[in-house]
Amino acid sequence: MRTLNSGTKIADLLKEYPFLLDYMAGLSPQFSRLKSPILLKTIGRVATVRQAAGFGGIPPAELLQRIRTEIERATGQGIEIESDEVPAPPLADMETRLEVLKDIIRRLHEGGDVEEQKRRFGELIKDVSPTEISRMEQTLIDEGMPEEEVKRLCDVHVQVFKESLEGQPLPSAIPGHPLHTLMEENKALEQHLATWNTLLERLEARGADWRSLRGEFSAGLTSLAEVEKHYLRKENQLFPLLEDKGVSGPSKVMWAIHDDIRAMLSDLRQRLDGENVTQFIAAGRKLSTAMADMIYKEEKILLPMTLESLDDSDWARVKRGEEEIGYAWVRPGTEWRPAVSAEGLPPLPAYQRPGATLELATGALTPEQINLLLTHLPVDVTFVDETDTVRYYSATAERIFPRSPAVIGRKVQNCHPPASVHLVNRILAAFRQGSRESAEFWIRLNERFVHIRYFAVRDAGGAYRGCLEVSQDATAIRGLQGERRLLDWE
C-alpha cells in the first residue's frame, strides 16, 4: 500500500500520478501555476506536500486527504497517510526560494492578506538575505511589474520580511569607507528626526504657540534637508555601480522614494507660512516616518546587498566621486584605504593627462584649456550621445544639479528619477526622429529660478549625434532692468 505524509515530494507524486497536476490546479489558483515549466522545475521539484500546502493556501492535512481521495478514485489503489508532526525545513534551493518570494509579492499586489503571506514566508522560507530581496524586486520588474507598483508595495513586503531582517547584523566598515560614512549620516539623521518629532509633540500639546515655534521648525527642515547630499551620493555613486552588476530595479524603486521625501520637504516649507496646524503636524509625521523607513531599508537591504556586490575597486570609484557631492552632517574618517593599486583605480580625466593640442573647427586647444573653458561657463552642460549614454558634464564650481564621475557611461534614463523618465524618452525620441530641435523648462529650486534647455546635436550631414542639456540659474537675469553700459566695479 502506498503511504503519504506531509514530507512526500510533489515531484515524486506527479511522476507516479501525472493526473494530479490537473487535479491540484483545480484546488487552488496557485497550484495552476505549477503548469509553468519554470515553477514545475523549481517549486515542483523540491517542495514537499507541507510546503506546497503553504504555497496553495490549503492546510497540509486537508491537502493530503484530498490527494489520497483522488489517487484512490483514479487508480483504485489504497493509500495510507502517515502521521508526521516534524516541521518541514525551509526551502534551500535558491531558484525555488525566488519563485516563492515572487509569488508572495504578487499575492500582495493582488490584495492578499499581509498576515497570511507572513505565515507562508515563515513556513516556506523563514529567513531572507538582502540580495534575495533585491533579486526578487529586479526579476518582478523584468517580468513586467511596474516600478511604481513595486515601490507601492515596498513597505508591505518589508513588513512581511521584517522579522527575518531584524535578525541580521548591520553592515559595518572602517571610518573613511563610503559605507561607514553613509551609516554615520544615518545616525545623525536619527538624531535630527528625534528633535523634529519632539517639536511636533510640543506643537500638538495644548497651549503650544504655532508662531513661536515656526523658527524652530524652519531650522529643523533646513537640517533634515541636508539628507539631499546623502541621497545624491546613493543616486550618483552607488546606483550606477549596481547597474553595472545587473541590479537596477531596486535602485529605481529607492530613487522614487527619495523623490517622495523631497516632495514632502518642499510641501512642509510651504506649510510653514500657513495656519492649519493639524495638517502641518500630519505632514511632519509623514515625513518623519518616510525618512526613518528609508534608513531601515538602507541598512537592512541596500547597504548589505551593496557590500556583497561591490569590490574594492568599485568602492574606490565611489570614494573618488563623494567630495564633488558633499556629505550630510558628518565628515568621513581617514582610516580606510582601498586595497587596489594605482593601476586598479579609475583613470584620471584626460585634461589631467599630458596630451596634444586638439584641432577644432575654429581654433586649437589643449585638453586642459577645453576643460577650463567649459568649467568657467556661466551654465552647466551635460552631453548625452546618440546611444543615450552620458559622455560628459561640466564640473562647474556651483553646479545647479550635482553630478559625479559615476554617471559617465551610464544610460541617461538611469540618471533621472523614475517619475520623469517618460519625459526624457519623449524628448530624445523627438530629437532622434528630427521632429524637434529643442525643449525647455523653467522651475523654482528653493529661492532660485532655473532655466533648463535641451538641444539636439547633429553632425554636418544632419545625423543625430546626441543631446546637449544646458541649465542656468536665471534668478539675477530675470531681475535686470534698464541698461548698464559702463563698467561698475566700485
Image: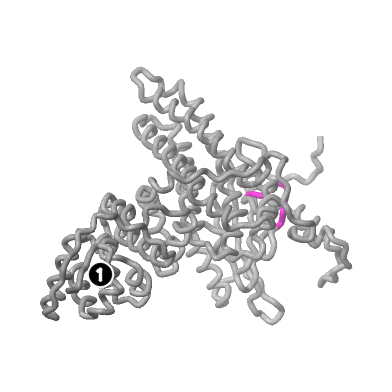
Q: Is 179 left, or right, of 140 in this rendering?
A: right
Q: Position of residue 77 (x, y in %)?
A: 14, 78
Looking at this rendering, what residue extends furthest in the front direction?
Answer: 1
Q: Is residue 217 above or below residue 394?
A: above
Q: Residue at x 58, y 44 (%)?
A: 172
Query: Looking at numbered disc 1 in the image, what kind of residue is underneath it?
Result: Phe
Q: Is residue 438 above or below residue 317?
A: below
Q: Please check the rendered image and state whether residue 39 is part of the magenta-colored stretch, yes or no.
A: no
Query: Which one is in front, 367 or 374?
Result: 367
Residue segment shown in magenta: 394-400
Q: Please check the rendered image and state whether residue 395 is part of the magenta-colored stretch, yes or no.
A: yes
> Which element is circle 1 on?
helix
The overriding secondary structure of the stretch rendered in magenta is loop
Q: Residue at x 17, y 65 (%)?
A: 81
Q: Is 29 left, or right, of 356 in this rendering?
A: left
Q: Mark 1 highlights which residue? A: 31
Q: Position of residue 167 (x, y in %)?
A: 44, 44
Q: How many marks?
A: 1
Query: Which one is in front, 488 or 221?
Result: 221
Q: Residue at x 50, y 44 (%)?
A: 169
Query: Which one is in front, 20 or 439?
Result: 20
Question: Which image quarter is the N terminus in?
Answer: bottom left
Q: Is 43 left, or right, of 223 in this rendering?
A: left
